[in-house]
Amino acid sequence: IRPGGRERVAFKMAERGGRGSGHGSLDKSITLPPDEIFRNLENAKRFAIDIGGSLTKLAYYSTVQHKVARVRSFDHSGKDIDNEPLYEISVQEEITARLHFIKFENTYIETCLDFIKDHLVNTETKVIKATGGGAYKFKDLIEKKLGLKVDKEDVMTCLIKGCNFVLRNIPHEVFAYQKDSDTEFRFQTNHPNIFPYLLVNIGSGVSIVKVETEDKFEWIGGSSIGGGTFWGLGALLTKTKKFDELLQLASKGQHTNVDMLVKDVYGGACQTLGLSGNLIASSFGKSTTADKEFSKEDMAKSLLHMISNDIGQLACLYAKLHNLDKIYFGGFFIRGHPVTMRTITYSINFFSKGEVQALFLRHEGYLGAIGAFLKGAEQDNPNQYSWGENYAGSSGLMSTSPDVYPMQRTRSGTFDMLEMDRLERPLVNLPLLKDPSTYIPDTVDLTDDAMARKYWLTCFEEALDGVAKRAAASQPDSVDAQERAEKFRQKYWNKLQTLRQQPFAYGTLTVRSLLDTREHCLNEFNFPDPYSKVKQKENGIALKCFQSVIESLDSLGWEERQFALVKGLLAGNVFDWGAKAVSDVLESEPQFGFEEAKSKLQERPWLEDSYSQWLERLKEGPPHKCALIFADNSGIDIILGVFPFVRELLSRGTEVILACNSGPALNDVTYSESLIVTERIAAMDPVIHSALRDEKLLLVQTGSSSPCLDLSRLDQGLAVLVRERQTDLVVIEGMGRAIHTNYYAVLRCESLKLAVIKNSWLADRLGGKIFSVIFKYEVPCK
Amino acid sequence: MEPPRSCGDGAEDEKKPRRRAGGADAGPSQLRRRSSGGAAGADGAAGPQPRERGGSVSRQRRDSVRKNRPLFPWFGLDIGGTLVKLVYFEPKDITAEEEEEEVENLKSIRKYLTSNVAYGSTGIRDVHLELKELTLCGRKGNLHFIRFPTHDMPAFIQMGSEKHFSSLHTTLCATGGGAYKFEQDFRTMGDLELCKLDELDCLVKGMLYIDSVGFNGHSECYYFENPTDAERCQKLPFNLENPYPLLLVNIGSGVSILAVYSKDNYKRVTGTSLGGGTFFGLCCLLTGCSTFEEALEMASHGDSTKVDKLVRDIYGGDYERFGLPGWAVASSFGNMVSKEKRESVSKEDLAKATLITITNNIGSIARMCALNENINRVVFVGNFLRINTISMRLLAYALDYWSKGQLKALFLEHEVKIPF
């Protein structure tokens, strides 16, 4: 088993010929593993299908029932609150919406349709939306097998709808291809405004479409020299029948044996004349003779260059005429093939003199199916929601250099999947981002940084057994918890191995994406919140210390207190769920433990230290109007670190928006937990109490379930509130949110980024030691 | 190409000094010879060098031109990637005195060239293109157009050597990439210096000149009226007197596209490697043919719709959503993806499809360039169009159809002799 291909082995079907060979013949000798593909069919509705020349893409919408941990306040009346847990945790079933997209070879279509029919329970589905060139051909088969009426949708309309959808919902959708760099795929930051753009779809021919808004697009041109020309002419010239094999031939050939180059016309004078001798003067210009044999490889290569250059040239001419600088390429000619992405990129660069970049889409193959689905699901308003790619349920980008993994390119017999979860609330940019179009959440690009990638992948691998154990232990009453934990372990392990081989599989690889993938995998096996009990306990313990911490703070003078508050924030941040030694001590003598954590902190000057400027600001400047605080951990962090700080801000007359994650991630405090914690603190503390009552302290959810923070995908409600309250200070706390992400984020208002580095490798990278402190106070340039 | 004007009129000449090339030690007499070679260089071996405009060289030359007529023979050579185009001016006003003085070598060359229409196995004189009774540098004569494949260049140089060409000329005006590629061979094998002239300059000047002298009393430039209507389509003369701006599309082995704003002001817009060489090269591979003429002949009997996938093959008719007519080619060679169809097409069909593919593509790129440059007249020239009515009519049609009548495709009778 080749590394990286491992995950796909499970879906490997009966061996068959390559793509495009199966016209007319259907393969029934496969069995489908229902755990892995066509999931949730029992709840499926709104089917759509996109049948291309060789691949079928099926889309459906399902409701997924999965477990979520809910927290609920006890009714404490008449009970001994000292010995009871703070709140109740219950695991409940929650229903969320998910989009499923499955790609497979046309040869399996009949088997797949049978499978769907057998597993389809929902009877309200009457129609299946269909698009693609093959939709007509398989119409009868689909109607017969599924008993659904086939409703055809225009190919290009679907393609563009799908394109808009992925551009809006998948942050790392777009990439540029770089042939000789360490990272072949350079992912682009999503521009908040995706329009206008040019979509060049290279199917059998070429369509060039200008897309101006969600619903407005125009076919501005095309060319008959496309993928069909490469395939058809290639088959004639080389007697090679399959498209993939033609590409293979091309990647091995020397076009200079077939093409007439400038230097063939000018001889050695090119250099003195300033001509690029290697440019092609005439494609196939050397084959103008009947008595010479040319190799298949050389002819295929020449043909590939001819077609790619021609398409690139036309695309540039159209882009220039319509004044567009974003060109996305798609169609089966491109579809993840490094060979064609490379030649197209070269051509665009050449003809635009570097002014236009050829861009590709990670989910290009799914655009038609997504669009057809969206057409059929208009009444569900899918475009009103934000969607997120589910890393656990998606195959990721396969392609890599054909020379390194030749067999991987032969994707016949494999099923590729994309799953997207509907996010319950729409996500938007933080209005305070200085420039949303250049904002990159992540500090280190692990696709780029091979050393860092190696370290973090190993780090996650080594932590995996512990995470799986913790997950199993979090559900002691469940009989299959062990089994599910093992499945989780295997799945995440496989993902990590895939990422070792193909770091770009899910877009730019970052610590955030590794963490998020782990969360998705945990959820997949119904471990919605493995740390719920830990959090519950730590919150309970910390709450008991709240009052004494406040008392000791209040006894300090103003300047001393400011420093103590900051130290408290930082010390609190030491307590992530793994710091078990610390929490044990806390349990017996909490006051001592918190102080001990403080003593672990690096002495000033900190690794990043702008505390003096912060103090100066507090001393000299007017109170902030409103502070937005992104909290990190449960327990001591939020209760003894963040809340005293919040309390001080409130006392200064600053309103506070406290933002916590919508869903669980590690021992991060969730929004629902923060509600209970705040309620309990309010009961003890009049400042917090009145602030809550007067809406000076507002609790909001981030819209995220990640230990990291993407300021370009935040809950819309949060964004509205931030604007309404004229927020002028943003406080970001913790490693995940302030170091792994947002370390370099530039905001339009003052900001504080603070964290304790609890990882020696990272500390080393930043030039410090473990427990080094980051205190970054930034004021926007005037 | 402006020799008559430059030779006949000193003032004109000053505007178009030729590059002093072909050897730094060239003396006045050599210069004169080069200039006379350029004079005959209807094939483009002439052109302005704006960087050297005016100055002592041209003044000196003008004076010498007045005093001394350039020496015969007058040649121009355009050495392309596939074909060599040779232009020869045959003086018809030779006086008895001159005849007597004419050296034997010169006479033999004149006789050899004018009494034959084929030279060796591959050289051909296009008799139908001959320009009769032309006045060039004050001399009357006929302009002959000869072509042969570039791969026979060594044989040509050999012949020049055998005929002691170097005794008549020390320099020969030449353009095209081959002027550089074969320069050394000319020097060592033929004892000849090449006066290398810029290809694009020659192209523009050549086009303007050939149009200015007319085609033996007929118009050089023409177009197709009603190109989209097969019944009513007809070839009509076009007056290219005030042609600017125009897009000049030269289709040789490859394609160069120039935007021409005045006779001295032009720029290369772009080019494509999909040109005549591609058509011929692919035809050789697909059909086993060995000459361009053979390839064209096959194409004229083929049916490309068996090879190409049309819009109607996919949509059953027009694709109205995008305003695409059913007859439009959706995918060139698209049907050849299928084994059965590969087995059912003829060589003629493949040749036709290759021709249509290359031609449509050139039309498409030319149209986009015209739009980007805001030019509505497109002159197509180059060897690809020689005896190639299919392509010319298709270009005329495609330009008219896709531009909704906004663009006009123009052609020249001597398309073949305009240099690259």
Image: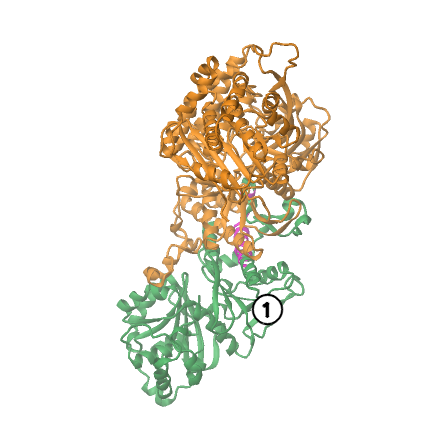
Chain colours: A orange, B green
Q: In which quadrant of the rendered view does residue A686 lie? A: top right
Q: Is residue B359 magenta?
A: yes
Residue range in magenta is B341-362
Q: Secondary structure at mark 1?
A: strand
Q: Is residue A483 magenta?
A: no
Q: Quadrant of the C terminus of chain B?
A: bottom left
Q: Amino acid at mark 1?
A: Tyr
Quick one: B387 or A177, which is closer to the camera?
A: A177
Quick one: A150 or A41, which is closer to the camera?
A: A41
Residue at x 58%, y 75% (from the top left corner): B239
Residue B92 seen anywhere in this rendered image of the structure: no
Q: Quadrant of the N terminus of chain B?
A: bottom left
Q: Which residue is mark 1?
A: B223
Counting from the top left corner in percent of width and height, residue A762 is at: 39, 31
Counting from the top left corner in percent of width and height, residue A8 is at: 49, 26
Q: In which quadrant of the rendered view does residue A712 lie? A: top right
Position above or below: B273 against A111? below
Q: For the image shown, how many numbered marks are present on the structure?
A: 1
Quick one: A622 or A782, which is closer to the camera?
A: A622
Chain letter of mark 1 equals B
Q: Main secondary structure of the magenta part?
A: helix
Counting from the top left corner in percent of width and height, residue A268 is at: 32, 60
Q: Residues within 10 Å of mark 1 (few under 14, many from 20)?
A: many
Quick one: A399 or A289, which is closer to the camera?
A: A399
Counting from the top left corner in percent of width and height, residue A227 is at: 53, 45
Residue A422 seen anywhere in this rendered image of the structure: yes
